[in-house]
Amino acid sequence: MSAVAARLDEGVAQDALNARFAAIARAENLLPVKVTKFYQRKIDEEVAALGHREGPLHRTAYPSQERLDLHAGHEVADWVGDRSNMGAPGSSAIIHKYADRVLFMPTSVCAGHCQYCFRQDVLSDAHGAGRSDVSGELERLVAYLETKPDVSEVILSGGDPMMLPVRDLELVLETLRALPQIRSIRMHTRALAFAPKLFDETRMALLEAADVRLVFHFVHPYEVCGDVEEVLRRLSRRGLRLYNHFPLLRGVNDHVDVLKSLITRLDDCRVRTLSVYVPEPIRYSAPFRLTLQRFFALQDQLTETAPSWINAVRFTLDSPIGKVRREQIASWDEANGLVTFRRGGANFVYPDFPAALDSPGERRVMLWKEPAAE
């Protein structure tokens, strides 16, 4: 069979997987496949170079057979407790988990959908409810903040706040900026990886005026291409503080060379990487998960082989009681795969990913294009 014929066969097989996944997504509150033209061009290049559809970018955007069939047990719809922390009356857009900061979701829309998304359940509900009433939700947020004087930071997430129409983005930022108690506005966005053109001069001016801290979600160095780097340079020239944090994903970036390449590339663009985190044990997440032992081993490899401005990154796990690190492990029951963490006097038990299912990604696949050739 020729290479062209093989790719056609793989394409047919992928179409069948997509259709099967679409049915599961409708039935089980998962996000459907959504890929921008910009990101699709990168995936097409990857498929052509590798000759198959198991590359890191394809894996982030399209379902695999493993995504549909592999389950590790102990997987839930909402691992971090988003629903249980929606404390504002009449709102599902306000999540208050930490005393000093509130997460606000003014939209459920993203530029593209990530297969590993940890908020699929909540976002699918929001999609079903229709377009957010931004002004109404913002009024509820302001009223809620008046009752919570200890809150000094609002985190804009979703969905992706960069998907808001300009008028809504302006309304949100100007309203928050006018609140004396709010010292920091943080915006989490993956839109730059999917659609750099969203970062036009109008939106960047709004971000600058509100002195927003921008936190990106780049998961692989190939996402930081020339078009993305140009936007980062323009944002940096405006004096915006730029950060990144991302999950360590099996088959996407679970090799120290991939981690170093991504963090270094971002550092060269004046983007500080804040944290690398464990993919959460939510439904259909097994293809991306890895054991805590290997997670910590990759942390150690990064520490040992990279300079301090690259390895000074937190390796964390989000949980129902907040983010925890290796030093907060209280006990480890390896026989049953249960790890107990302690934070602020509270314990929670993490169901570790089974070692028998943890097949590391291949470096030659995840870095099919060496940095010198990028």
Image (cartoon, rainbow, N blue to C red):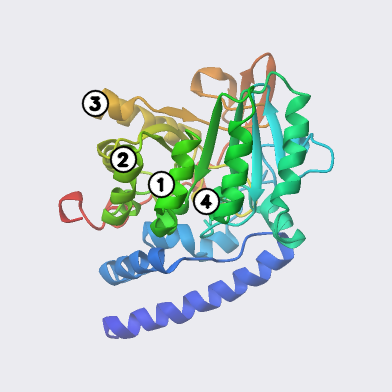
Give the numbered dot on residue 218. Answer: 1
The alpha-carbon separation of the residues under discs 4 and 1 comes to 15 Å
Label 3 SS? loop
Local crowd at mark 4 within 10 Å, few (<14), some, or many (≥20)?
many
Asked if labels 2 and 1 touch by Cβ distance under 8 angstroms, the answer is yes
User: CA separation, marks 4 and 3?
Assistant: 33 Å
| Residue that numbered label 2 is attached to | 266
Q: 218 above or below 333? A: below
Mark 4–mark 2 contact, CB under 8 Å?
no
| N-terminal label among 4 and 3 | 4
* Distance of label 1 from label 2 (alpha carbons): 9 Å
Q: Residue at x 52, y 51 (%)?
A: 162
Camera-nearest label, 1 or 3: 1
> At label 1, which amino acid type do we have?
Phe
- The reply to whether callout 1 and callout 3 are in contact (CB within 8 Å) is no
Q: Distance between the residues labelled 4 and 2?
A: 20 Å
Residue 84 placement: quadrant: top right
Instruction: Say the numbered circle drawn on residue 162.
Output: 4
> Between residues 258 and 13, which one lies in front from this camera angle?
258
